[in-house]
Image (cartoon, rainbow, N blue to C red):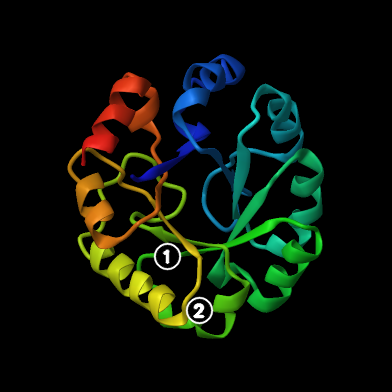
């Protein structure tokens, strides 16, 4: 069954603790988008806020660094309670250095790929990757439709992971809708990043629907 890394960006931002409590039993982990206003034209979650949210959940915190300097933000978010750190591949001058820094702090690693970034750019880094986050929409935009080529991109990612005998998880983020989720599951995604699909619907019913696919 598809697992959920639920995006708190789509929660009621004025009542995050209550929203987390409402959804806690129906998600495997939490996805926290971080945006610095430079790499993407948006401002989202920051370390002090993540630290304040940390006591409200026993589930893993997955921090998605949509920032120009991912290396410089590792320590602040590790200290705030991050368990998984995903950075944007094209934002890193040396992706290997960022992966090693995350590993050195005992955390799980992840890379996100923009729609137009091919899977092949990850060729030197597969053995260091715990999560590959395949973006289905442009970064920093909420409510957009998923690019039609994403299921095929996930299939190719799944085949690389299978051929290499790895346990790297594939996560689909962006454009997560009732009509796209079955396509993502069939393509081989392990996780989806639901936002409104979780918070605007009834969480137990949504999970029942996922289990039925």
Residue 200 appearing in the image: no
Q: Which mark is residue 100?
A: none
Indicate whether 211 appears above or below 121: above
Q: Quadrant of the N terminus?
A: top left
Residue 132 makes an appearance in the image = yes
Q: Quadrant of residue 79?
A: top right
Classify residue 128 by image quadrant. bottom right
Instruction: From the image, tell me which residue sits under label 1.
Output: 114
Which residue ends up furthest to the front in the rendered image?
A: 165
Q: Is residue 139 left or right of residue 156?
A: right
Q: Say which residue appears at 58% left-offset and 21% top-offset.
A: 16
Task: Please tell me which residue is depicted at 40% across the width and 81% down the height of the picture.
Answer: 163
N-term mark: 2 or 1: 1
View extreme (left): residue: 179
**Residue occupied by mark 2:** 122
Query: Which is nearer the eye, 53 or 34?
Result: 53
Say which quarter of the image contains residue 86.
Answer: bottom right
Question: Could you say which is closer to the camera, residue 74 or residue 212?
Answer: 212
Residue 182 lies, in percent from the top left, at 21, 47
Q: How many numbered marks, from 0 up? A: 2
SS assignment at label 1: loop
Q: Considering only vertical position in the picture, is 99 above or below 142? A: below
Q: In 3D space, how far apart are the residues under numbered discs 2 and 1 (Cα atoms)?
A: 12 Å
Residue reaching furthest to the bottom: 124
Question: Residue 100 location, x and y as percent?
Answer: 74, 71
């Amino acid at each position: 069954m598809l697992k959920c890394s639920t995006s708190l960006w789509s929660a009621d931002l004025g009542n995050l603790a209550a929203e987390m409590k409402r959804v806690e039993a129906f998600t495997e982990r939490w996805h926290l988008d971080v945006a610095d206003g430079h790499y993407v034209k948006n401002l989202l979650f920051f370390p002090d806020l993540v630290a304040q949210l940390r006591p409200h959940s026993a589930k893993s915190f997955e921090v998605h660094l949509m920032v120009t300097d991912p290396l410089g933000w590792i320590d602040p978010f590790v200290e705030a309670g991050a368990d998984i750190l995903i950075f944007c591949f094209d934002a890193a001058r040396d992706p290997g250095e960022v992966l090693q820094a995350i590993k050195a702090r005992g955390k799980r690693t992840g890379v996100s790929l923009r729609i137009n970034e091919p899977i092949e750019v990850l060729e030197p880094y597969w053995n260091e990757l715990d999560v590959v986050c395949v973006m289905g929409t442009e970064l920093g935009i909420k409510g957009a439709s998923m690019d039609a080529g994403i299921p095929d991109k996930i299939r190719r990612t799944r085949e690389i992971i299978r051929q290499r005998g790895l346990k790297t998880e594939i996560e689909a983020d962006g454009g997560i809708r009732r009509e796209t989720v079955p396509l993502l599951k069939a393509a081989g995604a392990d996780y989806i990043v639901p936002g409104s699909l979780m918070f605007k619907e009834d969480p137990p019913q949504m999970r029942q629907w996922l289990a039925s696919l």
